[in-house]
Image (tube, helix red, strand yellow):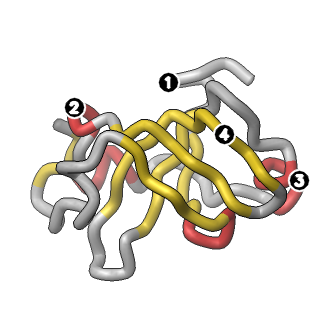
């Protein structure tokens, strides 16, 4: 599992990057309770996305995203806090 320090080396996504999200992209999604889930995006519908939760990429030392037991997570682009570009995916 990644430590919080390892996660924080990811730069915040730009609006251009958020607009370019598509199937196969990896994103860290905030659960609103200081937890994060890494997901692989499987569906994009405007600003609404669905991603497959990758619990193996969980951040140690932080609260787990409340959707960690789900296989799929529905979320809004505004919830994306980091992107996995050049680490987990190559956009």
Q: Is residue 34 above or below residue 8?
A: below
Mark 3 vs 1, N-terminal side: 3
Which residue occupies 58% across, 44% down? 83
Mark nearer the viewer, 2 or 1: 2
Residue 90 can be seen in this image: yes
Where is residue 26 shown, x and y percent of the image? 54, 35
Mark 4 vs 2, N-terminal side: 4
Q: Are marks 4 and 3 in contact (CB under 8 Å)?
A: no
Judging by the rendered image, the residue that carries numbered circle 2 is 56
Report the side of 33 relative to 26 (left or right). Answer: left
* Quarter of the figure that contains the C terminus: top right
Helix, strand or loop status at disc 1: loop
Residue 59 can be seen in this image: no
Q: Are marks 3 and 1 in contact (CB under 8 Å)?
A: no
Mark 2 vs 3, N-terminal side: 3
Judging by the rendered image, the residue that carries numbered circle 1 is 88
Q: CA distance from mark 4 to mark 2?
A: 21 Å
Mark 4 vs 3, N-terminal side: 3
Task: Name the quadrant containing residue 71.
Answer: top left
Q: CA distance from mark 2 to mark 1?
A: 12 Å
Where is residue 6 shown, x and y percent of the image? 32, 44
Furthest toward the left, the residue is: 61
Q: CA distance from mark 4 to mark 3?
A: 18 Å
Helix, strand or loop status at disc 2: helix
Judging by the rendered image, the residue that carries numbered circle 3 is 16
Q: CA distance from mark 3 to mark 1?
A: 19 Å
Which residue occupies 18% across, 49% down? 69
Mark nearer the viewer, 4 or 3: 4
Q: CA distance from mark 2 to mark 3?
A: 28 Å
Judging by the rendered image, the residue that carries numbered circle 4 is 43
Which residue occupies 68% across, 63% down? 77
């Amino acid at each position: 599992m990644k430590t919080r320090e390892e996660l924080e080396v990811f730069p915040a996504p730009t609006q251009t990057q958020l607009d370019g999200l598509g199937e196969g992209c990896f994103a860290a999604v905030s659960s609103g309770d200081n937890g994060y889930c890494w997901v692989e995006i499987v569906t994009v519908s405007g600003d609404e996305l669905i991603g497959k939760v990758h619990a193996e990429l969980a951040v140690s030392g932080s609260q787990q995203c409340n959707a960690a037991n789900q296989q799929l997570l529905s979320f809004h682009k505004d919830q994306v806090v980091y992107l996995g570009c050049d680490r987990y995916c190559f956009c």
